[in-house]
Image (tube, coloured by chain):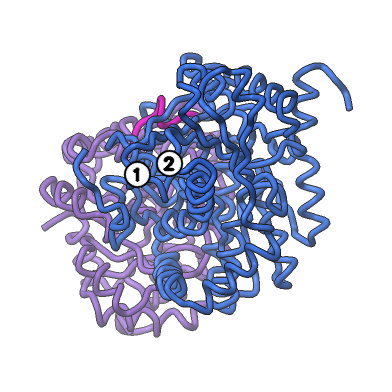
Amino acid sequence: MSRIEQRFAELREQNRAALIPYVTAGDPEPGATVPLMHALVEAGADLIELGVPFSDPMADGPVIQKACERALRFGTGLRDVLAMVAEFRKTDTTTPVVLMGYLNPVERMGYESFAETAKAAGLDGLLTVDLPPEESEDVVGLLEQAGIDPIFLIAPTTTDARMDHVAHAARGFVYYVSLKGVTGSQSLDTSALAARLDAIRKHTGLPLGVGFGIRDATTAAQVARVADAVVVGSAIVRLAEENDGDPVGYARAAAVVVRDMREAMDRARSTSGTATV
Amino acid sequence: MNKIDWAAFPDARGHFGAYGGRFVSETLMGALDELQKVYEQYMGDPDFMAELDHDLKQFVGRPNPLYHAERLSRELGGAQIYLKREDLNHTGAHKVNNTIGQALLAKRLGKKRIIAETGAGQHGVATATVAARLGLECVIYMGEEDTRRQTPNVYRMRLLGAEVVAVKSGTRTLKDALNEAMRDWVTNVDDTFYIIGTVAGPHPYPAMVRDFQAVIGREARAQHLEMTGRLPDTLVACVGGGSNAIGLFHPFLGDESVEMVGVEAGGDGVETGRHSAPLCAGQPGVLHGNRTYLMEDENGQIIGTHSISAGLDYPGVGPEHAWLKDIGRVSYVSVTDDQALAGFHRLTRTEGIIPALETSHAIAHVLELAPRMRPDQSIIINLSGRGDKDLNTVAEREGITL
């Protein structure tokens, strides 16, 4: 059983939704990331999504764009990010880590070389936002051999026909992009979410994570009632900027946000009865 | 070279060999499927094609001339040089051929809002123009650096009723404008049509833009045959994203005797690293929805580009060019900023035509190529745009304040 499967199985048993914080690797400086990951786990994260800095983050809003720019000042590249995963794994062998980013750095490193290095580092999943299942055959095969789950997105605009296609290629969990827009957008409509997730569940038995537009503990709790996982990115990454590049202050502030969300999500599940709707 | 069925490319999923494809976030996949469907439907629809032909004739002013540049040919003492006068189109460049076509598709799809990216501003102007004519809301994304270099075009777009957004992220040039337009599209995908200005981006854009621009080559081929009784020997066009080049080249691909040269922006010289020549000095990667040649570092980060011409200042290139390079059908070269400027002046003084700085790259290459050819041979240059927009850049470079 993979670390991701294991983690979702445990959570299901406890009737809890997974909390998945996203942070951009190397932001605000390379040395900040591994201690930050441990701090997030300590505060209640179940799985960590680690952003690979990219020069042209087309699917991201201003908060994560700036995080990429801060990380790229130090030249943090994909190999450096994998080294951070390996470092994290030395003391945490149970928390799954998923890389989230864009295809070109992986393409440049080479799919085989990436799969090999990522496996050795203890990486669990890869989500490349600009790689739809249609174009992913080569890389998915290599990832599966290396035991790394390819994570795919479903969007509000995904048709039923495409959902089957995505579900067929996906492993680990499916990431539902909760709104049309870039990361960090406002106004997630949680009322329509339950129906949408039900529709997706007709196509896949994988856990469903929901991300984009989850800004605070209240929204996280609402999403936790209906989803298997809550992904929070910009709400955390903005703290790097607010702490003016101080890694210790950033980690402390991020831990506070994660702890608040964790508590609100667990409370929501314990009062709403069953895990899935 | 084995016989290639040029009409079979791209394949159904938008691939030109290893290049092209559709590398976008899931949110846009539905919109691209929809676009591909209407594009395929209407390109075979006689009513749509009649409306397109009517607009190209009555609004754009097509067909434009294939002009024999006799004086320049004589001075260079080699091949006869012909200029395909896309600069005479309404709005002053080839870009309008494509915006007319895509705007008609937007109308068929019932979209009320149009967005576009622009580098030199020519595509932005051509988009704002068709949006004004059809009464559609229009937002143009332009790198902040380019809004400074191309002030007259920014004002032109605003006069036409477009909102011009100066993009302040990344390198503040064309690639960042494209990123921002993609972000807008993913947010407003229900009511917005994205008019991409070049033969790049996710499928079906590279094929669709090519098909709208291929009118250039179809006309040029017929005109050259009529004027000389034979096909040209060589075609030359500048390549940024590559839409004017594909537009000229594509109808000639099956003519094996016709050689083709795409001219990239060499900036300060390809050896300096300060250039915009991914085909000459880049390598394959994935950006902006397609796999193609890119300028990138060892980590796969896209690197800053440089060119005197904002329209060529882009780290990628259309995927069909990447494929044509690999199979050897088209050769790609680069010329420097200084060479392009020399080409700019030479054509202006010799033929009384002020070319765009982008186009000047093609002219610069021909200044070297033509003397090596015989006077009974011929070259067609795609004179893709006029140079009015570049007067400030040229003057500034030469220490003149206008």
Which element carries disc 2, helix, strand or loop?
loop
Are the two marked residues, 1 and 2, in contact with CB atoms closer than 8 angstroms?
yes
Residue A265 lies, with reference to residue A250, above or below; the image says: below
Q: Colour of chain A?
A: purple
Q: Which residue shows up at 47% across the image and 27% down it?
A: B376
> Residue B185 at what x, y percent from top left?
55, 62
In the image, farthest residue toward the top = B271
- Which residue is label 2 attached to? B231
Q: State which chain disc 2 sits on.
A: B
Mark yes or no: residue A50 visible.
no
Residue B201 image position (x, y, % from top left): 45, 52
The residue drawn where x is 24% and y is 43% is: A92
Letter of the chain in blue = B
Does residue B110 appear to the left or right of A75 in the view shown?
right
How far across and down, in percent of the image, does residue B214 sit? 48, 54
Q: Amino acid at mark 1?
A: Asp
Residue at image location 58% in from the left, 69% down from the top? B52
Q: Which residues are magenta?
A: B277-284
Q: Work out which quarter of the rendered image holds the N terminus of chain B and state it.
A: top left
Report the disc number at residue B180. Answer: none
Q: Depth check: B214 or B233 in front? A: B233
Neighbour tally class for label 1: few under 14, some 14-19, many 20 plus, Cα within 10 Å: few
Using the image as rendered, state which of residue A8 and residue B306 is in the foreground. B306
Chain holding disc 1: B
Asked if residue B280 is among those painted magenta in the image, a careful observer would answer yes
In the rendered image, which residue does mark 1 sit on?
A: B255
Check disc 2 and give the amino acid type. Leu
First in sequence: mark 1 or mark 2?
2
SS for tag 1?
A: loop
